[in-house]
Each structure stands twice: as C-alpha cells, then as structure tokens.
Image: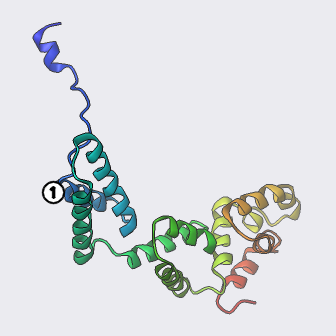
Amino acid sequence: MSDDDEKKSPKRRRGPRKATASYLENSAAHYLGRFATSTAHLRQLMMQKVQRSVMHHGTDADEGAKFVETIIEKFERLGFLNDQTYGEMRARSLHAKGTPVRGIRYKLQQKGLSEDVIDSALAALADEVEVRDLDLSAALRLAQRRRLGPYLSDEREVRDARREKDMAVMARAGFSYDVVCQVLDADSIEELELAASPDGY
C-alpha cells in the first residue's frame, strides 16, 4: 500500500468526547436547535455524555453534573427550554395525530414532565381545540387519517366487513370501548363532528 493510500484510509473511530463545560453546552445547543424537548429529557441526554466521559476519560461525574445543571439553567433563562411550552406543543401534536388523553399523559410523563405541567398542558389543549370531549375529538382525527367508520364508507356492509380490524386499530391507539363504538357506529361524519363539538348533540 502506498503512502497516499495510507493517508486516504479511514481513521479509527474515536471514543466519546470529554464532558467539558463547553462541549456539553455546545452539544445541548445543537440538540435544542434541532428538537424541542423537556428539561428532564435534556438532562438525561447530557448526563449520558457525562457518564460516557467518566468511563472513557476518567472525568469527574459530580463536576459533569454541575456543568449540566448550569447549562440547563442558562437555556431556561434564555427561554430555549420551557416545560410548559413544550408540554402544550407536544399535547397539541399528539392530539392532532389521534392520541387519546391517556396516551398524551403517558407520553408526557415519559419526557419527565410533572403532573402539574401535564394537567396544565391538557387544559390548554381543551381550551384551544374547543371540543366537548378530547378523546372523541382525537378519535375522529384518527378515524379520518386511517379511514375508519363513516370515514371509510356510507355503506354499512362495507364498514361491517372491516369492523373488527377497525376496532383493533382504535383499541391499540388507547381509546375506550365506548368511544370506539361511538365512532364506528355513527351514521355519518356529520353526526360525529356534531357529537365532538362544544355544544354536542
């Protein structure tokens, strides 16, 4: 192999970077530039880098944890990290995809949001979408996206042939039996939309 070939050969993959204050801050800024997230989730990601640095470089875990807290406080102060704003945005997105309240709550808990923040995010969602029942509203969105119930056809025979599969789709999404039946048994889309409106039937 020639000298030129040696120069062109790929370098061995480096291990994890040292968890210095500047590296962690740059890493956090890069992540926040690409994704919205919660304080707890960002802390978890940064602490994973700290732990890898401890294992690979022998850096101090407590010092790394202090760096992480300082970085989090900075981004909270600057407004790039806000659990309330993130919770409301995430709840809105999940509802639009057809996720029931129970599913939204679970996913927000996974991101480390407090129960108070989650309750507030769900209340804000209810105010924003202005519906009588958030679960029914989400079920309609799912039914529309997946062409379930009246969104599939006006003909009962066509819908009945798919009923069990459609029920399974909605059950897996986390909707209650009552909501599933209400959607799949509705005579028309208009009937469902009226039921989900603030005034109801």
Q: Quadrant of residue 38?
A: bottom left
> Which residue does the image show at 24% across and 71% down from the upper left?
75
Is residue 35 positioned above or below 140 on the image?
A: above
The residue where tag 1 is placed is 22
Is 194 placed left or right of 65 in the picture? right
Is residue 123 positioned above or below 147 on the image?
A: below
Instruction: Examine the rendering and report whether any part of residue 100 can be seen.
Output: no
Q: In the picture, which quadrant includes the N terminus?
A: top left
Quick one: which residue is furthest to the right in this view? 157
Q: Nearer the viewer, residue 87 or 98?
A: 87
Q: Nearer the viewer, residue 155 or 192?
A: 192
Quick one: which residue is furthest to the left in this view? 3
> Which residue does the image show at 12% across and 14% down from the upper left?
4
Q: Secondary structure at mark 1?
A: helix
The percent position of residue 67, horizontal first and vertical second, equals 21, 62
Tag 1: amino acid: Ser
Q: Nearer the viewer, residue 172 or 55?
A: 55
Q: How many marks?
A: 1
